[in-house]
Image (tube, grey):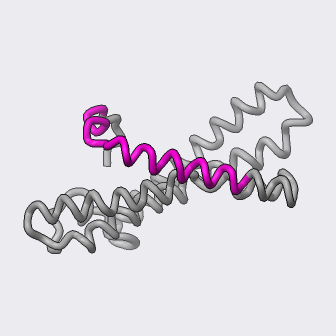
Amino acid sequence: MKIEINASALKQTRVSQVVVRFCLGGLITVAAGLIAKKYGAAVGGLFLAFPAIFPASATLIEKHERERKAKSGLNGAVRGRKAAAIDAAGAAIGSLGLLAFALLISRMISEYEPWLVMIGATIVWMATSAFLWYLRKHEWRSGSGADHESVTRRPPSS
């Protein structure tokens, strides 16, 4: 899988989809703020680490895949679920990277220059996420784990 930026995908995004993502992300952020107010910043921060737009993006990805298959006269429910599952795996990998970022910040921010800690934590976040992505990709190639290829490259049977 090649990582790339596809600007043409912006043309396919509807305003209503952006509004749904914005609203769900805002609600999750508000909920994290209320939790932080009641239980403290450390607990609230755990909830803020939840990818705020993930619930909206997962449902929209599933819907897009179903609609794409429906245009061909096929039932795309299975393909939609698999596409959403791959998105969820990516969100989990990113969250683990953010956990590494947060741990480094919490351990080093009081001992070193904050700007230096932020740069280091950002590098650790990127390296952790890239390493976990690489491991997951290797797992798919070896035949164990999720059937990534059926969603991204081969035409599905459903």
Left or right relative to 64: residue 103: right
How far from the left and from the top, in percent, is residue 60?
36, 57
Residue plotted at (26% across, 72% down): 77
Residue plotted at (16% across, 64% down): 69
> Would you say the magenta stretch is mainly helix, strand or loop?
helix
Residue at the right extreme of this rendering: 111
Q: Does residue 10 belong to the magenta stretch? A: yes
Instruction: From this view, report whether residue 95 is shown above or below residue 121.
Output: below
Q: Does residue 140 belong to the magenta stretch? A: no
Question: Splitting the image into 4 quarters, where does residue 72 fall?
Answer: bottom left
In front of the other: 147 or 85: 85
**Looking at the image, how many numbered discs can be counted on the residues?**
0
In front of the other: 60 or 23: 23
How far from the left and from the top, in percent, is residue 157?
15, 73
Left or right relative to 75: residue 8: right
Q: Quadrant of the C terminus?
A: bottom left
Residue plotted at (91% across, 36% down): 110
Residue plotted at (57% across, 51% down): 52
Question: Splitting the image into 4 quarters, where does residue 108 fall?
Answer: top right
Point out the stretch of residues depicted in magenta. Answer: 7-32
How far from the left and from the top, in percent, is residue 126?
57, 41
Instruction: From this view, report whether residue 131 is shown above or below residue 78.
Output: above
In front of the other: 131 or 87: 87
How far from the left and from the top, in percent, is residue 22?
51, 45
Left or right relative to 95: residue 84: left
